[in-house]
Image (cartoon, rainbow, N blue to C red):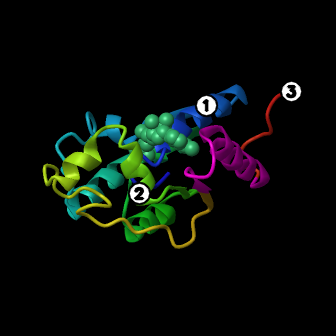
Amino acid sequence: MTGLSGAGKTTIALILEEEIRQRGLKVERLDGDTVRESLTRDLGFSKEDREKNIERVTFVAKLLSRNGVVCICSFISPYQSIRDRVRAQTTNFIEVFVDAPLETVMERDVKGLYQKAIAGEIPNFTGISDPFEPPARPDIHVRTDLQTPLESAGHILGTLEDMGLIPPAKL
Ligand code: ADP
């Protein structure tokens, strides 16, 4: 899942995790904020470090997925070239664009980070002082300014079902 900070990646990922588990699959969630506190806490936000961050996550996700664990990865992952590399290196990679306009995420500003970034207190902040390259051809595109989290999650689950990647919901 790729998108600006505050777009709703974590919120939707939590719903997906629960729903996929309910369907009898093993599932693990890797999230930018928590991974950066552990596996990649030595990394910053330069392009090079963002690349390393995603590289390490890809490594872990591959180990999990080849053992039959659905892996939900929610990361800003702002560069198309890096997302494309992950796609090339993994099987069943689904790029989900969690999309909300910059004005919406700035208005939400759940973590107060946009205000700080605009004040110049956070360098390399995606959308403000660092690029975000919207996916050219995402497998799934959700608009969180127009849909509720449940609607976005429902759309993602429906598409994964249609692709034959997850079973339908249990009755
Ligand atoms: P991200 O993981 O992309 O940084 P978060 O999920 O942490 O984003 O934060 C998104 C915030 O926006 C949450 O506080 C969530 O409740 C709120 N929000 C409001 N509307 C939506 C929506 N339609 N979809 C997802 N999140 C939404």
Q: Which residue is mark 2?
A: 103
Q: Residue at x 36, y 51 (%)?
A: 106
Whether label 1 lies within 8 Å of ligand 1 gets the answer no
Q: Main secondary structure of the magenta part?
A: helix
Q: Which residue is mark 3?
A: 171
What is the spatial separation of the Cα atoms under label 2 and label 3, in whole angstroms? 40 Å
- Residue 81 is tagged as none
Q: Which residues are magenta?
A: 142-163
Q: Residue furthest left?
A: 121
* The magenta stretch spans residue 153: yes
Whether label 2 lies within 8 Å of ligand 1 gets the answer no
Of the residues under marks 1 and 3, which one precedes in the sequence?
Answer: 1
* The magenta stretch spans residue 41: no
Q: Residue at x 66, y 34 (%)?
A: 20
Q: Residue at x 40, y 59 (%)?
A: 102
Name the mark nearer the viewer: 2 or 3: 2
Q: Is residue 162 shown above or below 136?
A: above
Q: Which residue type carries mark 3? A: Leu
Mark 2 Cα shell of 10 Å, populated few (<14), some (14-19), many (≥20): few
Is 65 positioned to the left or the right of 155 in the image?
left
Percent position of residue 97, x then y? 53, 58
- Residue 60 in sight here: no
Q: Which residue type carries mark 1? A: Lys
- Residue 26 is tagged as 1
Q: Which residue type carries mark 2? A: Glu
Which secondary structure lies at badge 1? strand
Q: Residue at x 73, y 30 (%)?
A: 23
